[in-house]
Image (spheres, rainbow, N blue to C red):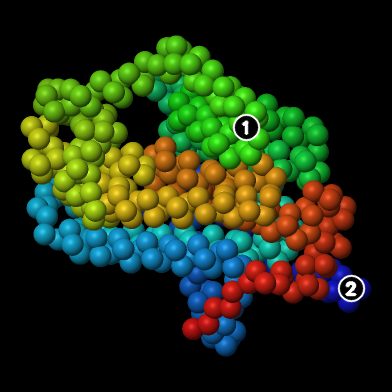
Amino acid sequence: MDEVQTRTRKPADLSFYGRRLFLFLASTLSSTILLKVAEIQFLEIIYCLQLGFLIALFPRRRFRTRLFRPAFVISALYGVFMVVTLISALAALQNDFYFPSQLSLLKEPVWITFSRIIELTVDVGAMVYLIQLFRTDIENLIFALRVYFWVGVAACVYSIVSFPLNVLYDLQLGTYVDVHRMRGFFNEGGPFGVYLISELLIAIVLYRQGWISRRSYGVGMVLVGVGAVGSQSKSALFAAGLMLLFNALMVKETGRRLAVLAGVAAILCVCAYLPAISEPLRAYVEKPADFEYYSNFVYSDPNYVYGRVAGAFIVPRMIAAHPYLGVGWGNYGIVRDSPQYRGGAAFADYDDAPGLGLLGTAAEVGIPATLFLIGILFYPYFYLRRIEAPLVIKNLALMQPIIHLFGGQLNLTHPWVITAFAFGLGYFYKHHGLSAYPASALPSVVAGVAASGGFEGNEAVVSG
């Protein structure tokens, strides 16, 4: 043990700084999705470079590596999903395509599916690598959690500080539209509000473990709370309600389950009468019903002709026409103008996306593949439930399926980082009693993990 402890305390080498830089960028840029080259996020480029570097090192490891078994299982499941989507895209070639103007090669049939598969491969690979970094050294996990939390707090501070400037000079820095909804480093307030739920969960983990001070926790929670309220995110409210509902259904004791269900029902009833929530919901119901007729009068209004309103009208028609294989992953924008789906509504002059999350995915890959995908997304939660991880860690694992359910695309980077956090925390909880180790005990924890050589019986050997 002394030898291992000495080894963990030697001066940091270049590989140490390289790992920390990667963790810093993953925790930072996953929360700043506005930073892009064309339509590719900065972090996706970094993920590609990192995975290329790891592949180049694979021969030096004699084409063998050890993976956390749950990470290996989830990777294999995503591999099956990608094969199915490719078959779906090939079958969709028999459909009629209506290409919008200025369409690039990577958005044409089959090619767009390949690009989606590559993006998903990169995201899954990055998640697996993060899990490996977290489970081999708890200090990596703590570092990444702290960075992720403080970047979220910085996003809230950015919105709060810019609010008066936006009101006075209409700059729209950290807020947008006339009501100045806070959006931090995101595109919209809705996704920003859902992201802040993960911030609250991570803050609870950090504070309970003694990895941030009481003052930092208090200040951070206040700022995140202001950002959540300022985002005016209906998605965040429904995401929180869905999380409570799911937790209630998983409670074994009938009395507690009924109590939580009653509380969720009461909250939903109150929210249904709030104008800020009920009026936008009514608009989401009424606008698609009139979309086919009214879109021809406002054909130049992208808020009506594109996005969720159009998707709410078109997607159900696509699912009804192709329930098993869909129209091809990524093909929504190049088939949505077909009269079969669009009816008599206005044409889309530019590439469009439904913005309906997994419902839009069902239109593109079919119902069976979407249900399979949902099962993969919930796999981390059920794994953590099986090992009886604390509730806050299980709820972190719920974030990714909830984010995708409420409109988040699979290529968003921060849900994959959150899932890696959940796996890393679950690992140390199960095998080293996470809650029993304050920050002062970290050297011995790290030494114990190194001495044990990972956790036996929960590794898969991958060879190529």
Image coordinates of residue 118 in percent, x first then y, are 37, 64
| Placement of the N terminus among the 4 image quadrants | bottom right
The spot of residue 424 in percent (x, y) is 66, 57
| Residue depicted at 82% across the width and 61% down the height | 445
Residue 80's spot in the image, x, y percent? 38, 66
Closer to the observer: label 1 or label 2?
Answer: 1
Circle 1 SS class: helix
Sequence-wise first label, 1 or 2: 2
Q: In the rendering, at what x and y percent does residue 111 appear?
A: 24, 63
Alpha carbons under labels 1 and 2: distance apart: 47 Å
Residue type (three-letter) at the residue carrying disc 1 = Thr
Q: Is residue 305 rendered to the left or right of residue 76?
A: left
Q: Is residue 456 left or right of residue 192?
A: right
Check residue 1 in the rendering and tell me which mark sits there, or answer none. 2
Which of 37 and 222 lies nearest the eye of the viewer? 222
Q: Which mark is residue 295?
A: none
Residue depicted at 12% across the width and 32% down the height = 346
Number of marks drawn: 2
User: Viewed as shown, does residue 181 lie left or right of 27?
Assistant: left
Q: Residue at x 56, y 26 (%)?
A: 261
Residue 243 visible within the image: no
Above or below for 11 versus 224 = below
* Callout 2 amino acid: Met
Badge 2 marks a residue whose secondary structure is: loop
- Residue identifier under label 1: 254
Q: Nearer the viewer, residue 361 or 351?
A: 361
Whether residue 404 is visible here, answered yes or no, is: yes
Tell me what residue is drawn at x 48 percent, y 23 percent. 232
Q: Residues within 10 Å of mark 2 (few under 14, many from 20)?
A: few
Q: Residue furthest right?
A: 2
